Image (cartoon, grey):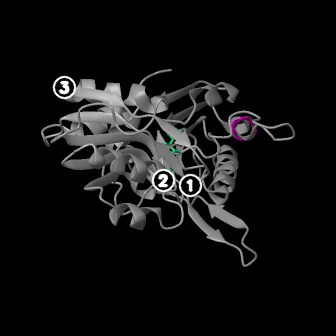
Amino acid sequence: MIVVGGSSSRDLAKDLAKLLGCIYIQAATMRFPDGECYTRIDSDKLDDDIVIVQNTYPDTNMIEMFLLQDAVKKMGAKSISLVIPYFGYARQDRTFKPGEPESAKVMAKHLSMDCDRVITIDIHKETVLDHFTCPHRDLKAAAVIADYFKGRGIDLVLAPDIGAAGRAKDVGDRMGVAYDHLEKTRLSGSDVRITPAKMDCKGKRVLIVDDMISTGGTIIAATQALKDAGAISVAVACTHGVFVNNALERLTGSSLDTVLCCNTLENEISHISVAETIADALKEKW
Ligand code: R5P
């Protein structure tokens, strides 16, 4: 097995290769003056099982993934596994209004062209993976998040909305602490309303878990609701720290005590690693 790291996921790909005890090759990706992507894998041949680690967000990374798939195929890859730590477009998983495309399906269809199996982590909607024409698995970050926070005095694990309630249960059960969820209404792309917390938060140290933080609107509103209900500290752990615009600054400047994310998107607070979770899945025959 050989791991090829795309430009979005260098550290994660390197860690993965180390855990698998296999060769790591960093794709040399550059931009032409007009912005088009150029990539090259500096190796004579790749007649092995190849694992490409690369996000499909933002769009430029999706293009790089397509090019890497073609490059490894041309170099003789015996099989191509795609590890897509953060799968972009998963939130447009259906046509919400007439005339819209099914964006997630389009991406999966095109990625399927040169691909034998796909791994994603906490994809926004698992049904998106059914559009891949090859075997696929969505791995969960709940175990590594629970391991990180175990023994750090958390009293309650909360999801910011019902959609993330299963994740809060998974993390809470693994940590051996209570879990619950808040009620969220989305008002716009960046604004949400969180109904005042009904559970007993007084004097508690709360951990909020979610699949992603994008604008930060959800977490800022949830933190405020929990502090209003008497929580003494609020930490948040998400799988994907997308942090659009100045979301990370807004979060660190809010009443939130701790914010952390997994290394599916690499940034200054992506301290929870999913490398071992991915390595374990790649070692299995499937
Ligand atoms: C929603 O279904 C997701 O799980 C996240 O809660 C949401 O995408 C976070 O977005 P934002 O940070 O913009 O509120």
Q: Which residue is mark 1?
A: 190
Q: Residue flagged by tag 1: what amino acid is it?
A: Ser
Q: Residue furthest top?
A: 286
Q: Which residue is mark 2?
A: 217
In the image, the residue with mark 1 has its CB under 8 Å from the nearest atom of ligand 1: yes
Residue at 30% across / 59% down in the picture?
A: 255
Residue 59 part of the magenta-drawn span: no
Q: Nearer the viewer, mark 3 or mark 2?
A: 2
Lower position in the chain sequence, tag 3 or tag 1: 3
Residue 62 image offset from top left, x and y in percent: 66, 52
Residue at 46% across / 48% down in the picture?
A: 218
Q: Residue furthest right?
A: 99
Q: Which range is magenta?
A: 104-108
Q: Residue flagged by tag 3: what amino acid is it?
A: Gly
Q: Which residue is mark 3?
A: 176
Q: Residues within 10 Å of mark 1 (few under 14, many from 20)?
A: few
